[in-house]
């Protein structure tokens, strides 16, 4: 450091120089502590993935450390006149921030979440949550960390000239900047090629938001759906160590009852609201529901198509979406159907090049329709293809049919945030017309089963992937309609009924596994749902999307986000007091969302 004779300038210059080295030493400490994230999430299943875990650790926390220097150390060097007070202040701030990092690693271990305002509320009420006690023990680390920081501070102050004389600052900065850039460039490549050992590390570190460019690459013509599918197919999926699904090997009855001799038809409609089940909008399904079992208060496991289908086939919360899709882990339902030698007839009006199909639900199945993964059909063609497939099937085999009908104009409910009230009214009219057209397809499907003499031998399940609100998606009021879908079941041997208790998509897997596929394993070992015919009321249902979770209860709806924001309304849409949060309920939800974690 060259002195200029200007005392203030020289003082600030030395403090800033000290701050550079202090930040570097703390980066080393932070990086060592952050190795716990890798420990708790598990090493990647490829050499490149493991290398990325460590490179991204250094790159990410180098950036965080640079931000720490820029917004704290640098301005304080001008604001605090005394170097002693400056170093003590910075050491205290550093000790507090590192203690929060240690706290975050423990929360990540317990809940697979990072510290947010909601979890902070839990820490203030440890008497309700036993696991919090082990977390609160980390508070005692603050004075210890403060002493360590003071020692580092004094050492660097004493050795500052010696460190600067070594001229290693620029090589270190170059190395750290390279790891930061490499972290994002490699992730862009991994996202574009669906290289799961890297993409599954997206949220391992707090405040980590790796760059993606898949949309840009497609717009430039450098990436297309065929190439993407080829990249996916080249990978060799293995079960990741962080997931324990199912929790134990499933057991089955060796003697099948007559119920297990039934075919299964699962018919799903994109964005189908529960209130569309009436004589005006869906006259045929409304009439059909009188012959079957209608669940009036049924909710999708998600407010989006992708996760809605995921909840149908897995019976799991959205929390496991990335784990299953990135690792191609098939649902126990489909595995059992394969074991029972069901013939699969899979038909979708949007094709199958979607994570909810090829990377999860049907990842271990090969059918002619799946081979034409990028083909998109209209609803009528989807029905016709299913009819042609059905006509070729032998009655000696059990059949599993999956039909997906999409809405022709999805923008009418997907862009509600940018629409006026008049636009939403017009869109509702268009939506009702689309629903009426889908109703005709359902009529054709049922008629085909009747003509083939298979209706009496087929369990028919008709529902929506999720619903549509036509309110602003950022508004919690949209939660009233976003997941409320119709569920109509035709179950041979069961009498028509109307069920008013709250049920969910996650209940369908346990229902089929227990009543059709002969499992004797309890549902909590492979799902968070319960048998639809179980008369017991549950305390709540869980839905939402990847950013916000929705808890449906008989008297209210609660939304909480990954960022810790929480809101509650009643079923009339009136806001409720946010201070009276049921911490025990939220902890139960968090526990349910980590039930199938290995740690």
Image (tube, rainbow, N blue to C red):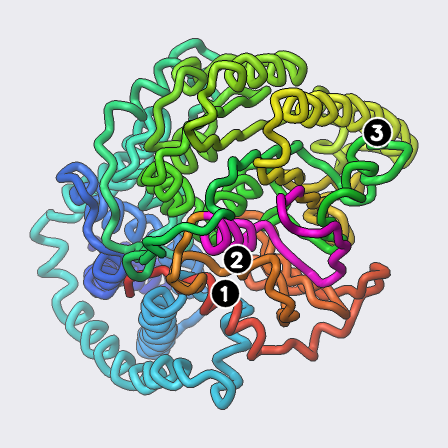
User: Which quadrant holds the C terminus?
Assistant: bottom left
Task: Look at mark 3 in the image and give the residue it sits on.
Answer: 432
Task: Look at mark 1 in the image and give the residue it sits on.
Answer: 116
Q: Residue at x 45, y 11 (%)?
A: 220
- Residue 312 in percent (x, y) is at 54, 44
The mark closer to the camera, 1 or 3, is 3
User: Which quadrant holds the N terminus?
Assistant: bottom left
Does 491 appear in magenta? yes
Residue 213 lies in what quarter of the image? top left
**Which mark sits nearer the N-terminus, 2 or 3?**
3
State the separation of the CA atoms marked 2 and 1.
7 Å
Which residue is at the far bottom?
127
* Relative depth, front residue between 139 and 85: 139
Q: Is residue 270 left or right of residue 589?
A: right
Q: Is residue 560 left or right of residue 79?
A: right
**Which mark sits nearer the N-terminus, 1 or 3?**
1
The mark closer to the camera, 2 or 1, is 2
* Relative depth, front residue between 427 and 554: 554
């Amino acid at each position: 450091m060259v002195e200029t004779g200007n005392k203030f300038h020289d003082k600030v210059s030395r403090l800033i120089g000290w701050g550079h080295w202090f930040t570097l030493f703390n980066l080393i400490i932070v990086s060592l502590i952050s190795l716990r994230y890798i420990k708790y999430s598990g090493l990647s299943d490829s050499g490149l993935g493991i290398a990325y875990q460590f490179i991204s650790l250094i790159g990410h926390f180098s950036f965080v450390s640079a931000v720490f220097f820029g917004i704290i150390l640098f301005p304080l060097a001008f604001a605090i006149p005394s170097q002693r007070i400056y170093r003590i202040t910075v050491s205290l701030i550093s000790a507090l921030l590192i203690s929060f990092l240690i706290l975050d690693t423990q929360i990540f271990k317990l809940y697979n979440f990072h510290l947010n305002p909601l979890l902070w509320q839990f820490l203030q009420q440890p008497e309700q949550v036993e696991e919090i006690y082990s977390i609160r023990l980390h508070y005692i680390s603050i004075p210890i960390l403060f002493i360590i920081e003071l020692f580092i501070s004094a050492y660097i102050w004493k050795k500052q000239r010696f460190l600067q004389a070594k001229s290693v600052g620029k090589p270190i900065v170059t190395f750290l900047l390279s790891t930061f850039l490499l972290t994002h460039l490699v992730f862009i490549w991994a996202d574009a090629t669906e290289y799961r050992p890297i993409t599954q590390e997206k949220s391992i570190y707090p405040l980590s938001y790796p760059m993606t460019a898949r949309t840009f690459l497609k717009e430039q013509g450098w990436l297309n759906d065929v190439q993407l599918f080829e990249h996916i197919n080249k990978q060799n999926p293995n079960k990741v160590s962080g997931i324990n699904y199912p929790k134990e090997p499933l057991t089955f009855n060796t003697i099948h009852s007559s119920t297990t001799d039934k075919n299964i038809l699962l018919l799903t409609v994109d964005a189908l609201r529960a209130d569309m089940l009436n004589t005006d909008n869906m006259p045929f399904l409304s009439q059909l529901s009188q012959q079957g079992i209608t669940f009036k208060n049924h909710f999708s496991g998600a407010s989006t198509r992708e996760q809605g289908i995921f909840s149908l086939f897995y019976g799991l919360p959205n929390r496991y979406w990335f784990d299953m899709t990135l690792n191609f882990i098939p649902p126990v339902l489909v595995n059992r159907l394969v074991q029972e030698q069901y013939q699969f007839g899979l038909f979708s009006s949007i094709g199958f090049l979607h994570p909810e199909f090829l990377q999860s639900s049907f990842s271990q199945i090969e059918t002619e329709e799946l081979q034409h993964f990028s083909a998109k059909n209209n609803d009528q063609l989807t029905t016709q293809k299913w009819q042609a497939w059905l006509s070729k099937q032998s009655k000696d085999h059990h059949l599993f049919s999956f039909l997906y009908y999409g809405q022709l104009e999805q923008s009418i409910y997907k862009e509600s945030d940018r629409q006026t009230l008049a636009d939403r009214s017009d869109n509702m009219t268009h939506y009702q017309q689309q629903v009426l057209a889908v109703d005709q397809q359902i009529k054709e499907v049922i008629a085909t089963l009747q003509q083939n003499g298979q209706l009496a031998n087929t369990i028919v399940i008709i529902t929506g992937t999720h619903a549509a609100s036509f309110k602003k998606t950022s508004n919690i009021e949209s939660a009233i309609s976003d997941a409320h879908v119709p569920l109509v079941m035709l179950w041979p041997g069961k009498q028509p009924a109307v069920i008013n208790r709250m049920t969910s998509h996650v209940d369908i897997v346990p229902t089929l596994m227990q009543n059709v596929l002969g499992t004797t394993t309890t549902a909590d070992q492979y799902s968070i749902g319960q048998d639809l015919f179980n008369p017991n009321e549950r305390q709540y249902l869980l839905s939402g999307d990847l950013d916000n979770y929705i808890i449906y209860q008989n008297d209210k709806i609660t939304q909480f986000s990954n960022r810790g924001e929480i809101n509650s309304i009643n079923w009339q849409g009136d806001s409720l007091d946010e201070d009276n949060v049921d911490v025990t309920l939220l902890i139960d939800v968090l526990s349910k969302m980590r039930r199938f974690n290995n740690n």
